[in-house]
Each structure stands twice: as C-alpha cells, then as structure tokens.
Amino acid sequence: MDGKFYGVGVGPGDPELLTVKAVNAIKNADVIIAPKTEKKDGSVALTIAEPYILDAEIIFQTFPMVKNFDESKEIFVQNTNQILDFLHAGKDVVFLTLGDPMFFSTYIYIFDLLKNSGAQIETIAGVPAFLAIASHIGRPPAYGNDIVTIIPATAPKDKIADALKVSDSTVLMKVYKNFAEIVNLLDAENMLDDAVLVSRCGLDDEKIFNDVRTHRNETLNYLSTILTRRAKIEN
C-alpha cells in the first residue's frame, strides 16, 4: 500500500506557530522533504520544524527560484519522481514549506505534478508571513471594506505601481533585491510614512524597520515583507 504525501506549512519562523495537524504529520512522517535553494546548504523550513521531527529520514531537495516554471520543470519532475518512489515504498512523506503551502510556495509546483498521479495528498495550512507579522507588530492589514493588495516585490515595476494605485492597504513580499525602488514607488503613492518592514519574522535574526525611508539602502534577506496603508490626506 502506498504512503501518503503531506504538504505542511511551517509558518514564517516561530516553531510554536505550527498547527496541531502540522505537528502530528511531522511527528508521524517516515520521510521529511526539506526544500533548499542552489545557493544555500540549509533549509529554513527544516529548522522551524526540527523540534517536532522524531525518526524520519531527512531528504534535501534543491529547487530553483521560479520565474518561468517551464524553464525549470526538469528539476521539479526529478524531485517529484523521488517523492513517488518513497510513496510507492509505503512511506508517508512530509514536504515542508515556509508560510502556507498554497501561497507563493515551491510546494504548489510539486502538488500540481502529483495531483494526477493517484497519490494520496493532504495539504496542511500554515500561517502566512504577512499575517504573523501583523499580529507580531500590532498592525491589522484590513479594516472594514479596505481593498488589500498582496504584491510580490519581484514583479515588474509597472505592475507593482498599478497595483498600489488601487489599494487601501498593501502587503509587499520578497522585498530584497529592489528595496530602494519599492521605497520610491510607495512614496509616489503616499504609502511610505505608514510602512513597516519586517525581515525573517520569528527567527533569531529578525529585523523590524519602522522608518522604511531611512533604511532604503540596507541589504535585506529574501524573507522580507512590508505592511503599509495609504495615508489619509487632510483637506
């Protein structure tokens, strides 16, 4: 009998933010898949889940930062085939992912490749970084009928600018390579004074910038998020 595949969201950094269901899946796993990038040896998701891992075999799988899935598909297929081998051997496999598995996650591509394979799949929700940040710093992302826009800062500049124009409240994720440019875009839309940036929320090296303007030239980690609102203009 084949094993079961679990996509488990481990949240943004604090191990105590994992759900009970996520913890149980991790504790009962035969195999833990820890995704990593080509540039780094470790896995942040694995570090977060580590307190709950018992006797599982740890498998590191390397994934590229995806902009065009078709150009990177081969490595995803290879990793999926390795997961299928474990499942066919009757092993329960947990794929760890930061935040929520269905939100800007590497897991989504593995899920899409597996969903028509006949494998048993269960996706376990996790706490997205921007909601953990909102609670952590006391900044609700939405009031009443606010239009909330979630933007990857890696998107083209013109698309970011267009999205900001129609938003009351904005979440900007993956703010790292183009931090200064993002600051300029927020300034143009009167959304800079109320902006707060949090990098690596819940991890030991967490940073919080309440005055984003003065930190615009800082070197940031990929796991950096801005929460902001449009300033009210007094007549």
Image (cartoon, grey):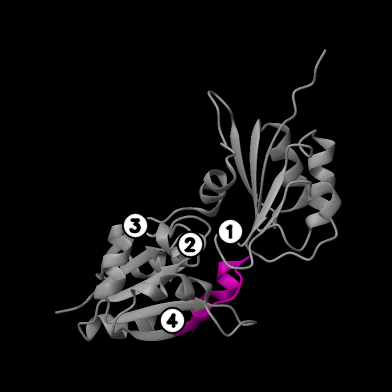
Please give the residue where the numbered disc 2 appears in the rendered image.
Answer: 14
What's the CA distance linking mark 3 and mark 2? 11 Å
Is 168 inside the magenta-drawn segment? no
On-image quarter of the C terminus: top right
Which range of residues does the magenta coloring cover? 60-79
At x 66% / y 65%, what residue is drawn? Answer: 222
Please give the residue where the numbered disc 3 appears in the rendered image.
Answer: 19
Q: Are marks 2 and 4 in contact (CB under 8 Å)?
A: no
Q: Is residue 200 visible?
A: yes
Question: Which residue is at the far top?
Answer: 235
| Residue type, label 3 | Thr
Compared across the picture, whether 143 is left or right of 118 comes to right
Q: Report helix, strand or loop for mark 1.
A: loop
Picture quarter containing residue 50?
bottom left
Which badge, 4 or 3, comes first in the chain's sequence?
A: 3
Query: Label 2 crowding class (10 Å Cα cut-off): few <14, some 14-19, many 20+?
Result: some
Please give the residue where the numbered disc 4 appears in the rendered image.
Answer: 79
Q: Report helix, strand or loop for mark 2.
A: loop
What's the CA distance linking mark 1 and mark 3? 17 Å
- Image coordinates for residue 146, horizontal then vertical, percent: 58, 27
Q: Which mark is residue 142?
A: none
Looking at the rendered structure, the number of numbered marks drawn on it comes to 4
Query: Label 4 crowding class (10 Å Cα cut-off): few <14, some 14-19, many 20+?
Result: some
Please give the residue where the numbered disc 1 appears in the rendered image.
Answer: 201
Query: Label 1 crowding class (10 Å Cα cut-off): few <14, some 14-19, many 20+?
Result: many
Up the image or down, 190 lies above or below 64; here it is: above
Query: Label 3 crowding class (10 Å Cα cut-off): few <14, some 14-19, many 20+?
Result: some
At x 76% / y 42%, what residue is drawn? Answer: 161
Which badge, 1 or 3, comes first in the chain's sequence?
A: 3
